[in-house]
Amino acid sequence: MATFLYKMGRFAFRRRPFVALAWIALLVLAGVGAASASTATSSSFSIPGTEAQKAFDLLDERFPGAAADGATARVVFKAPEGERMTDAGHKAEVEKVVAGLRSGSDQVASVVDPYAGKAVSRDGTTAYTQVSYKVSGMELTDETRDALVEAGDEARDTGLTVEIGGDALQAAPETGSGEIIGVAVAAVVLVITFGSLIAAGLPLLTAIIGVGIGVSTITALATVLDLGSTTSTLAMMIGLAVGIDYALFIVSRYRAELAEGREPEDAAGRAVGTAGSAVVFAGLTVVIALVGLAVVNIPMLTKMGFAAAGTVVIAVLIALTLVPALLGFAGQKVFGRKARKRQEQEQDGEAAKPNMGTRWARFVLRRPVAVLLTAVVGLGVVAVPAASLEMGLPDDGSQPVSTTQRKAYDLLSDGFGPGSNGPLMVVVDVDEAERPKEAVSRVTDVVKGMDGVAATVPGPLNKAGDTSVVTVVPKDRPSSEGTEELVRSIRSAGADLKSDTGAEVLVTGATAMNIDFSQKMNDALLPYLALVVGLAFLLLMLVFRSVLVPLKAALGFLLSVVAALGAVVAVFQWGWLADLFGVEQTGPVMSMMPIFMVGVVFGLAMDYEVFLVTRMREAYVHGERPGQAVVTGFRHGARVVTAAAVIMIAVFAGFIGSSESMVKMIGFGLAIAVFFDAFVVRMAIVPAVLALLGKNAWWLPRWLDRALPNVDVEGEQLRKELGDDAAEDERELVRA
């Protein structure tokens, strides 16, 4: 592989105008496709294999249009103190709002009159109207949203308290200034690392081009592939981070090769052949982790994983082709003044001063047990809150208290009970029942008598007379354990009811869908971990020709990701430092957060493992002692890996300022996970373990060594083909 990539790097360097123009043309083409595509919508949400989805599909079949996934809104009215919503004046005003909503937009499917639909609280102080739309919240026009908001404003003018809940007010997640700050921090880190504006600008430029192509392609295909609006945001988050990092390692290796006295074209080829090999395998681990999300069998999550993986593939290709092409344009300008002076000193035979990476590696080698215990215990303490992890999906109750959605949620809870914000739909399939009406009545009576039920509202049979829907209002809020237990109780009773009446009972609705989604994510976590870690373990065995090094890498990852989950629970669930991170409302951690973070962080963690340990493996293969190889790896790689980690943390942390709660949580989780993995696991635990293992770290059974193909990531075969002599290796040993 190293030889092939060497030739690719030299080709890109020689044909730099052609390569640069080709990537620019792809960017323009993707941009034109994105500009001409329709606006991205919220992707359809389905959970194959669950009871809630089965019931939803049955409703769609038996009650055409009743199970449509269009947007909904609840306009909640509260009368002034001492007055009631049944007063003539207030009733007339509400009916005026209902009429205005019905005629306000052709996207409105139906509007329920609260007085006809029994949507007035028992004390008469609160009422609400339900508005159903023909399209999803992301497809609503500004005129439709304006009509909804204006209807509420007109009612407020009469003295009523009016708040609006539901997903009809949902808008595309805003891209705040945080992302720009993250990129700015990355630029500063790159300038400090390289001491050259040209060298610092190259990774940023190539990463932006790669993300531009990836995100534009996602936008262009959003409608065709039913991609959600957050898909491009997450692809941008990951693509920007890895794009900067991959280019950073190529540029750093290119500068090192120039410092050895190579010709620029040869240096570009060697940089792509060695560091580029690490980029390929690091990219593969990220792609495996993202594509592996398909095992969860949640279409939305699968699409997010594939879209982000595609952006990573683009980042790898750009690092291997566009980066060496731009290095050809840059020439010697990739060096700053200090770097050029240091290069001249080394060429004159002056010994280079040990850098921070060298000093740190030697410190760890002297005290491996103390460093290892400190790092493991520290991460273990941070991981403690993960034991209290509660998962769920966000609803209006998780919105900041200042929003109208949250105010509407609280008004409904006060007026109708907490469960009114998440009623359950009990679908009764009486196709095989001998007495359909009696079967529905029996199901209603059984459910009504269960603990945790506030009210039941049986619905009529459909036209075919084979299906009915019983609306069940729980006593507890939608995301509570009590409501989850109620769903399980109804489903448990379903078996007895079927044997007694012949009716099949299925529970669905947004609350039941959320419960099933969380359960499915829990069930998929271990199989997903086994698949991803297993494949990556095999991949790392190819890279390092070792059993213990990949095992250490996987265990270190698990430790860092559990610690990161502990930090997420502490901030977003317990509220520790919530104000610092802009968390206005604490609550359960989003169901997809753990498995998504596992996938992404695993790929990124393996990046650092590959980049850092590859240099150690390279030094060991060239004859250095195990301890000295660790020092050499840190001397060459610690500064760059540190810069890469700081950049990733800055980029991910920039998304903490997002208005989308999922993006905010994922941004924080990824940022803290990268911090733990790069600075605690890779910089402390890895060298400590390697110091304790010595030569055993690179042990590989002979039969396995013969069975595994030699991918030559360290470039040993490339060196032989290029005729590098032993004197160069000796000089390297002297400098080390």
Image: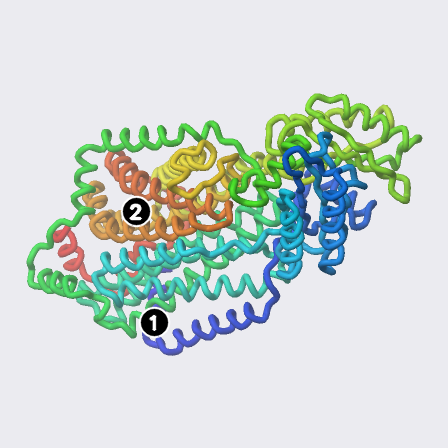
Q: How is the image coloured?
A: rainbow
**Residue 717: image x %, image y %?**
30, 59
Select label 2 or label 1 by which is in front.
1
Identify the amino acid type marked 1.
Ala
The residue indicated by pointer 1 is 325
Q: Position of residue 370 (x, y in %)?
A: 23, 29
> Is residue 453 rendered to the left or right of residue 677?
right
Q: Is residue 165 visible?
A: no
Camera-nearest residue between 640 and 134:
134
**How dense is the environment of label 1, judged by Cα within 10 Å: few (below 14), some, or many (20 and up)?**
many
Q: Earlier in the sequence, mark 2 or mark 1?
A: 1
Residue 177 rendering spot, x and y as whole percentages: 40, 56
Residue 732 in the image: above or below residue 550: below
Label 1 element class: helix
Disc assigned to residue 138: none
Asked which secondary structure carries label 2, the reply is helix
Looking at numbered disc 2 in the image, what kind of residue is underneath it? Val
Label 2 vs label 1: CA separation?
27 Å
Q: Nearer the viewer, residue 561 or 469?
A: 469
Q: Determine whether 617 is above or below 517 in the image.
A: below
Query: Is disc 2 surrounded by few (<14), some (14 to 19) or many (20+) residues within 10 Å?
Result: many
| Residue at left offset 58%, top offset 54% | 228
Instruction: Locate residue 630 relative to residue 474 in the image: left or right.
Output: left
Residue 719 coordinates in the image, percent (x, y)? 26, 61
Q: Which residue is nearer to you in this view: 348 or 2? A: 348
Q: Tell me the residue that label 2 is attached to.
A: 613
Residue 313, visible in the rendered structure: yes
Image point 28% across, 35% down: which residue? Answer: 689
Identified at 69% across, 56% down, the residue is 135
**Left or right, residue 503 beside residue 79:** right
